[in-house]
C-alpha cells in the first residue's frame, strides 16, 4: 500500500507544489506577457538598417512567389556577391511581403509571433532538462520580456535570431526525445529542424555541440550509446547537405583564416563581459553597440552578482551550472570570432540563443533555490519583471523610425563611423550644417567604411562640387558596389556629355531598382538622344509593363527615329 502511494505521488503534475499552489496554463501566461510588453512595437516603423534592403529594395523579388525556390540559390544580400546563405530568412521576408507589402506593422506582428513560438518552445526545453515547471516558467518569462532581447523583436531583421531559435530549440527537444525514447520520428524531426536552422543562419553550426552537452553532460546519457552514435552521424549528414546546398548556390567563400579568427577573438573578447552585464543589468542598451563605447563595469558587477547568487544557494547542481556556462559560450562563440572587417558591432539580438545558457545557470541560484513559497517566489519575481518590462518598452521606441534609430546609435556609439554617417545623412533636411559636419567627421574616422564614400560624394553634389564627387562614388563602387552610386555617376557623366557612360550606369541602376521612374525616364531620354531606336522602344515597353509613366513627347521622338 505504501508503495502504491509513493508511485501515485511520483505521478502528480510537476507544477503542483507541496504548498498546494498550482500554475495553470503557463504557456498562455507567457504569451499574454509577450503581447502586453511588445504591443507598442506594432506602431514602430523601419530603421533603414537592413530592413530597407529586405523590404523596399527587394520588393520586386518579394512579389514573386516562385522566388521561394530561388532563395536556395542565392545569397541573402546579393544573388552571388555574398558570403551569407540564409534562404529561410529570405523566404520569411518574402511571405511576409505577400501579407504586408510595404507596411511595417505586418512585419512587427510576425516578429512578435516568432518570439512567442520561441519562448513557448524554450519553456518546453527547460522542462525536458529536468527543471521544475514553476522555475522553467519564471526563467522563460525572464527571457520573454528581457530588454536586451528586444532588438530581436522590435527590429524587423532581428527575426533571423528568433527563427534560428525556433529551429534550434526544436532540434534540441527532438534530440532529447530520441535519446530517451528511441522513436525514429524524433530522429527525422531532429534532422529536419537542424537543417532548417542551418538554412536560417550559419551559426547553427554550434547547435550540434550544444545538443551533445545537454544529453551527455546535463542529462548524463552515455555518449557512446547506440542512439547517440546514430544522431552524431545524422548531424554530420545534415552539415554535409547544407554545405552542398550552399556550394550549389555559387556564393563567395569567405577568405577567413585561423589567424584572422584569432585576432578577431582577442578583439571581441571584451564583448563576453559586456554581454553578461546586459543580461543581469540591462541599463546601457544600444541599437548599434560597439566594444569601445560599451562600458565593462556592468559586466564585472554581473559576474559578482551571479557568483553571490550561486554562493548562497544551498541546493545548486554544479553540473547544470557548468553545462549552462558551456552552452552560453558555444552559442556566443560566432559573435566572438567574426572578423572585424565583416562586422564590428556587438548587436544585442545575438544574445537570443546564448541566453539559454545563462538561464540554466540562474536555475541553480538562490533566486529560485530558496525556502519561499511558490506564490511569493512569483510575486517577488514579478517586481523584477516589471522593471525589465518598463526598460523594454522604452528601448523599443529607439527603433521607431530612421532618425530616432540613428540618433540613438550615434549617441550610444560615438566612435562608430557608420553610426555617425547614418545619423548625419538622416538629418540633412532638418539641419544641413550639422548633417554635413557629421558626414565629414565619419569620413575622417574611417574612409573605408561601407557607404561613407557614397554619402560624402552626395554631400559634395549638394554643395555644387560635382567634379570632386565623382572620385568618391567610384571609390564606393569598389568598396561595396552600392547601386545608388550608379545613379549619381550617370548624372555626373550627363553633365560631361558622356552619354554612353551615363547610359551604362543607368542600365546598371535599373537592373537593381527597375521601378524608379526618374531613372527609367532618364535612360529613355539618353536612348533617344543617342538615336538608339530599338533600345528606346524596348525601354518604353518595359516601363509600360512595370506600370511606369512614359513622357509622351519622348515616346513620340523614339517612334520617329
Image: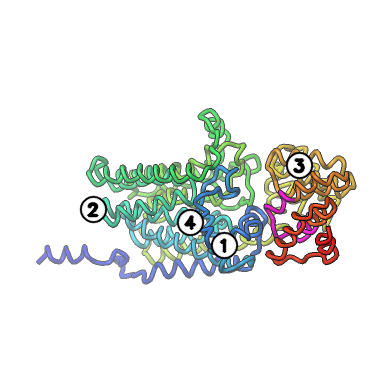
Q: Main secondary structure of the magenta part?
A: helix
Q: Is residue 469 magenta?
A: no
- Foreground tag (3 vs 2): 3
Q: Quadrant of residue 477?
A: top right
Disc 2 designates what residue? 182
Disc 1 designates what residue? 64
In the image, residue 441 sits, relative to residue 281, either above or below, namely above
In the image, residue 545 sits, relative to residue 519, either above or below, namely below
- Foreground tag (3 vs 1): 1
Q: Earlier in the sequence, mark 4 or mark 2?
A: 4
Disc 4 designates what residue? 163
Q: What span is colored magenta in the figure?
A: 507-521
Q: Quadrant of residue 212?
A: top left
Provide residue 112's location: percent of width, then percent of height.
Answer: 52, 64
Q: Earlier in the sequence, mark 2 or mark 1?
A: 1
Label 4 to label 2: alpha-carbon separation: 27 Å
Nearer the observer, 501 or 163 = 501
Residue at 40% across, 45% down:
241
Q: Which mark is residue 453?
A: 3
Label 3 to label 1: alpha-carbon separation: 33 Å
Provide residue 13's location: percent of width, then percent of height.
Answer: 27, 66
Label 3 to label 2: alpha-carbon separation: 58 Å
Amino acid at each position: 500500500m505504501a508503495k502504491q502511494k509513493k508511485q501515485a505521488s511520483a505521478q502528480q503534475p510537476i507544477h503542483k507544489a507541496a504548498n498546494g499552489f498550482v500554475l495553470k496554463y503557463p504557456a498562455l501566461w507567457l504569451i499574454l506577457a509577450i503581447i502586453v510588453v511588445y504591443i507598442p512595437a506594432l506602431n514602430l516603423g523601419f530603421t533603414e538598417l537592413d530592413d530597407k534592403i529586405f523590404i523596399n529594395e527587394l520588393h520586386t523579388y518579394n512579389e514573386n512567389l516562385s522566388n521561394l525556390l530561388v532563395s536556395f540559390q542565392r545569397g541573402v544580400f546579393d544573388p552571388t556577391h555574398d558570403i551569407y546563405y540564409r534562404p529561410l530568412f529570405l523566404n520569411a521576408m518574402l511571405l511576409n511581403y505577400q501579407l504586408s507589402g510595404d507596411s511595417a506593422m505586418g512585419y512587427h506582428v510576425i516578429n512578435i509571433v516568432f518570439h512567442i513560438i520561441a519562448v513557448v518552445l524554450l519553456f518546453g526545453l527547460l522542462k525536458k532538462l529536468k527543471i521544475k515547471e514553476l522555475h522553467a516558467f519564471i526563467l522563460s518569462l525572464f527571457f520573454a520580456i528581457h530588454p536586451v532581447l528586444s532588438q530581436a523583436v522590435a527590429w524587423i531583421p532581428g527575426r533571423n535570431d528568433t527563427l534560428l531559435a525556433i529551429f534550434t530549440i526544436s532540434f534540441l527537444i527532438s534530440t532529447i526525445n530520441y535519446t530517451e525514447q528511441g522513436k525514429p520520428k524524433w530522429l527525422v524531426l531532429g534532422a529536419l529542424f537542424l537543417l532548417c536552422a542551418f538554412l536560417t543562419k550559419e551559426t547553427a553550426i554550434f547547435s550540434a555541440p550544444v545538443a551533445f552537452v545537454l544529453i551527455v553532460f546535463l542529462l548524463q546519457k552515455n555518449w557512446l550509446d547506440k542512439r547517440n552514435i546514430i544522431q552524431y552521424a545524422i548531424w554530420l549528414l545534415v552539415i554535409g547537405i547544407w554545405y552542398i546546398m550552399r556550394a550549389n548556390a555559387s556564393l563567395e567563400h569567405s577568405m577567413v583564416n585561423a589567424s584572422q579568427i584569432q585576432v578577431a577573438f582577442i578583439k571581441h573578447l571584451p564583448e563576453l563581459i559586456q554581454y553578461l552585464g546586459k543580461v543581469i543589468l540591462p541599463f546601457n542598451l544600444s541599437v548599434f553597440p560597439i566594444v569601445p563605447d560599451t562600458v565593462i563595469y556592468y559586466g564585472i558587477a554581473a559576474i559578482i552578482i551571479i557568483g553571490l547568487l550561486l554562493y548562497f544557494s544551498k541546493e545548486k547542481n554544479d553540473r547544470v551550472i557548468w553545462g549552462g556556462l558551456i552552452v552560453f559560450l558555444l552559442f556566443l562563440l560566432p559573435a566572438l570570432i567574426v572578423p572585424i572587417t565583416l562586422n564590428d558591432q556587438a548587436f544585442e539580438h545575438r544574445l537570443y540563443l546564448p541566453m539559454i545558457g545563462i538561464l540554466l545557470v540562474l536555475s541553480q541560484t538562490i533566486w529560485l533555490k530558496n525556502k519561499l513559497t511558490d506564490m511569493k517566489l512569483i510575486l517577488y519575481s514579478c517586481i523584477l519583471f516589471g522593471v525589465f518590462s518598463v526598460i523594454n518598452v522604452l528601448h523599443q521606441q529607439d527603433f521607431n523610425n530612421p532618425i530616432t534609430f540613428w540618433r540613438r546609435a550615434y549617441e550610444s556609439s560615438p566612435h562608430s563611423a557608420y553610426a555617425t554617417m547614418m545619423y548625419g545623412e538622416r538629418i540633412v533636411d532638418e539641419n544641413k550644417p550639422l548633417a554635413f559636419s557629421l558626414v565629414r567627421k565619419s569620413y575622417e574616422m574611417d574612409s573605408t567604411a561601407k557607404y561613407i564614400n557614397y554619402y560624402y560624394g552626395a554631400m559634395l553634389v549638394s554643395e555644387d562640387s560635382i567634379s570632386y564627387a565623382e572620385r568618391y562614388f567610384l571609390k564606393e563602387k569598389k568598396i561595396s558596389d552600392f547601386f545608388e552610386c550608379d545613379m549619381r555617376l550617370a548624372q555626373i557623366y550627363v553633365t560631361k556629355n558622356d552619354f554612353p557612360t551615363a547610359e551604362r550606369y543607368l542600365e546598371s541602376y535599373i537592373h537593381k531598382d527597375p521601378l524608379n521612374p526618374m531613372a527609367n525616364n532618364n535612360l529613355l531620354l539618353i536612348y533617344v538622344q543617342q538615336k538608339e531606336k530599338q533600345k528606346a522602344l524596348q525601354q518604353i515597353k518595359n516601363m509600360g509593363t512595370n506600370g511606369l509613366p512614359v513622357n509622351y513627347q519622348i515616346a513620340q521622338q523614339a517612334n520617329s527615329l
